[in-house]
Amino acid sequence: MSAARLPAEYVPPTPVEELSVRSADGIRLHVEVHGQPGAPTIVLAHGWTCSTAFWAPVIRQLTERYRVVAYDQRGHGHSEIPPSRARYSTRALADDLSAVLARTVPVGEKAVLAGHSMGGMTIMAGGGRSEIAERTAAVVLVSTGPGELVAELAVLPEAVRSPGLRRFLNRQLLRSRLPLGPVSSVSRVALKYATMGPGSAAGQVEATARIVHACPTGVRANWAGVLDRLDVHAGLARLAAPTAVVVGTADRLTPPVHAHRIVAELSDPQGLLLLPGVGHMAPLERPVEIATEIHRLAAAYLPAAPASVSAPVSSSAAPAPVSERTVAA
């Protein structure tokens, strides 16, 4: 598939504003603002090996109603590459989110935060931080997990039954420093198998491949080291904002077991959305459903948001049973 044939919905939209934000340790972060100035704010945090381009189809769904902020995680996209391995950590992720919120969400206002994969881990890592909480109205966690990632990876065939061998091989796959090289027919097939649902369209696979292959090898490997030892359970337990969770049933990187654990540990769960047959790249595979879930939380918890969808029970009301919903294709 040539560049000209990439479907328009996966081509990154032109932001209305671009910002350069410095994190606590001085790392420069690239931030984009899309949509309607003055409208309620949505903040999007992407995952490992991705960039703001990953959110393109979701941004297109949200810009008519919202001001949408998306930023490149450190080392990714147009953000600065950390000069040492010590600058890669879940604390740094939370610092970066804090810096982006301080720059893009005015004092006294709040935003809905949505994080995919490592972006969700970023939000969980920031759980309990007052400077993040005071700017957070609600959260949507997509295809993510709080820990035990290596143990739960489902990329290897079921024939590899030994837990110890699976853990060893999973760790080698996760932390590989082999360069991905140019996008090819072979790499598309491999990437689709590992990260996407079997029914993913060719345009979705192509968009994913271009984004992932653009991540520098060293950045990919250094963040893999952080993910290998990930543990953000403590932050998750302190995440006070009403939070919805989304996962694809065919997610091999953060299987649904993680989503169920997250819901069990949340202080204010707002439902678990299951997407049948969808892999790890849910925002690219099912952007309408992801945007709708973000809007559902925004309509309920952002005072100025358009209330054109049914709102969940307010977090100030009596606790309600957590709903588990399945949205078919």
Image (cartoon, helix red, strand yellow):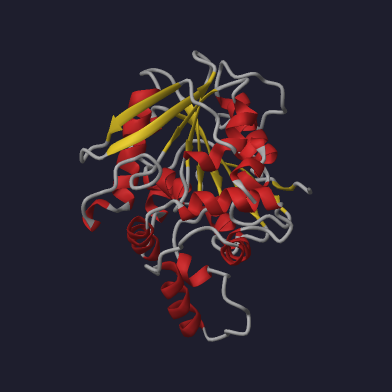
The one of 44 and 74 positioned closer to us in this rendering: 74
Asked if residue 11 is positioned above or below residue 87 in the image, the reply reads above
Q: Measured along the vertical axis of the image, is residue 71 above or below residue 175?
A: above
Q: Residue at x 30, y 53 (%)?
A: 89
Q: Residue at x 52, y 27 (%)?
A: 14
Q: Residue at x 56, y 64 (%)?
A: 187
Q: Is residue 293 visible?
A: no
* In-front residue for pair 292/186: 186
- Report the number of numbered marks: 0
Q: Residue 31 in the image: x percent, y percent?
A: 39, 31
Provide residue 262's location: percent of width, then percent of height.
53, 53
Q: Give the image location of residue 322, x and y in percent.
A: 65, 46
**Residue drawn at 46 percent across, 78 percent down:** 169
Residue projecting furthest to the right: 328
Name the one closer to the observer, 308 or 129.
Answer: 308
Q: Residue 226 placed where, x, y %?
A: 34, 60
Q: Is residue 176 visible?
A: yes
Q: Relative to residue 165, is residue 284 drawn left or right?
A: right
- Judged left or right of residue 195, residue 50 is left
Image position of 118 (left or right of 274): left
Q: Is residue 100 above or below residue 127?
A: above
Q: Quadrant of residue 79?
A: top left
Q: Quadrant of residue 86?
A: bottom left
Q: In the displayed structure, does residue 252 sit left or right of residue 213?
A: right
Furthest toward the top, the residue is 38
